[in-house]
Image: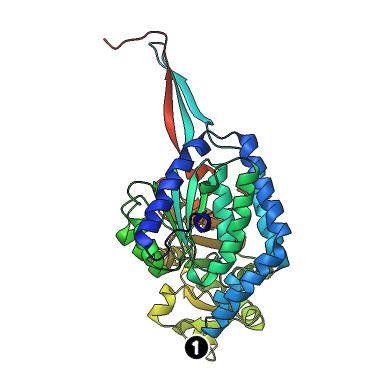
Amino acid sequence: MLDKAKADLTDVDALMLDIGRRARAAARPLAIASTTAKNAALAAMADAILADEQAILAANAVDLKNAEDSGLAASFIDRLTLDPARIAAIAAGIRAVAELKDPVNEVIAAWDRPNGLEIERVRTPLGVIGVIYESRPNVTADAGALCLKSGNAVILRGGSDSLNSSRAIHACLVKGLEKAGLPADAIQLVPVPDRAAVGAMLTGLDGSIDVIVPRGGKSLVARVQSEARVPVFAHLEGLCHVYVDASADVDMAKRIVVNSKMRRTGICGAAETLLVDSAAIGTHLMPILEALTEAGCEIHASPTVLKIHPGFKAATEEDWRTEYLDAIIAVAIVDGVSGAIDHIARYSSHHTEAVIAENPAVVERFFNEIDSAILLHNASTQFADGGEFGMGAEIGIATGKMHARGPVGVEQLTSFKYRVHGTGQVRP
């Protein structure tokens, strides 16, 4: 560990290159580590998280005080906050990853050629993954566990606002690695808040990093996409939409819309825009808006909505492009599913969209014509989560189209190689 090595933390470039070299060295034995060893490490990590709960909460209290003194938004503080229930959930998430099937060396496809060659396509670790994330300290555990299970070394660069919390959690992960006899450098946390560390990671650390996974706000992801010299699993902002069709059950629509927006407003799966079918203005609109208002949500309304209820705040063009991460939602009336599709195509970040409808033709069009990573029918957008998908946990929701899309779990953290078996064949 860096403290043991008494590394000079003032020289960020040298520090990061050293972290990269040690991650690359750890990646080789980790790639061939047994499932038993990886699962033992994960179990020990979960045990350490629970055993060190008070130390983690104490570290989190320091981060929370700093955040409050800095006047950070309530939604940000919610993402940063840990309590006994959330710590228990972190440990449970690690155990859930241990229960997942080990993807390494899984045969994805196999076939024989007429010349007798036997060909297999098998999963293989990516190598070293750099994860750059902001205020959520739980990502330290999620990313570390997922990378370990998929046979990858990982370099974690959490937000400066959560550095104390992340350090406390990371210490538990290292305990698990050491107890299972796996290299402690397999999961490293950048120990300094200096933004230069991010820039160093984006260079690839002299070939040490194979892929970058950014998880955070628009400015972070934009910087990563602009400056990265290694492949990126893009996680854009969660500008999520809910469309309520005239065929929707009103009570169901109320429950889903309120949950999509208000369950946790600061997560990327929170709904930011509500679209209501013009044919449902007289039946669905006001019951849903009243339910949102009662739940404490601020409404930013389109001109059509304002004609019906002039008391709401007028929506501007910027509202349709805003990820509030707060108890605010933009509301517009659209001309059926065609109007919803057009609005989403124009403004969506391609993260998650939901349709509430009983008409199967509406659902089919919504699913076929909208190009977002996650589409839901009659369910809350807050299910956009790797754990809810049965993937144990996730590093983030990838909104790009290459390699990984949607929740990034253990399978998405692998590539593949071909194994070809012959009996002496030569090519004529």
Q: Where is residue 178 in the image (x, y as percent from the top left)?
A: 61, 45
How many discs mark residues in the rendered view? 1
User: Which residue position is annotated with label 1?
Assistant: 313
The reply to whether residue 363 is visible in this rendering is yes
Seen as rendered, the residue at the extreme left is 428
Q: Where is residue 325 in the image (x, y as percent from the top left)?
A: 52, 74
294 sits left or right of 3 in the view: right
Q: Position of residue 352 (x, y in %)?
A: 51, 60
Seen as rendered, the residue at the extreme bottom is 311
Q: In which quarter of the image is the C terminus?
A: top left
Give the residue type that dot 1 points to.
Lys
As displayed, is residue 271 above or below residue 428? Answer: below
Numbered disc 1: secondary structure:
strand
32 sits left or right of 97 in the view: left
The reply to whether residue 383 is visible in this rendering is no
As rendered, which of 336 and 229 lies closer to the eye? 229
Coloring scheme used: rainbow
Residue at 55% of width from left, 79% of height from top?
A: 66
As displayed, is residue 247 above or below residue 65? Answer: above
As displayed, is residue 344 above or below residue 295? Answer: above
As rendered, which of 156 and 396 lies closer to the eye? 156
Residue at 34% of width from left, 62% of height from top?
A: 199
As rendered, which of 242 and 195 lies closer to the eye? 195
Residue at 68% of width from left, 52% of height from top?
A: 46
Residue neighbourhood size for the residue with mark 1, other residues' Cα within 10 Å, grouped as few (<14), some (14–19), many (≥20): some
Q: Position of residue 24 (x, y in %)?
A: 43, 43
Residue at 70% of width from left, 61% of height from top?
A: 52
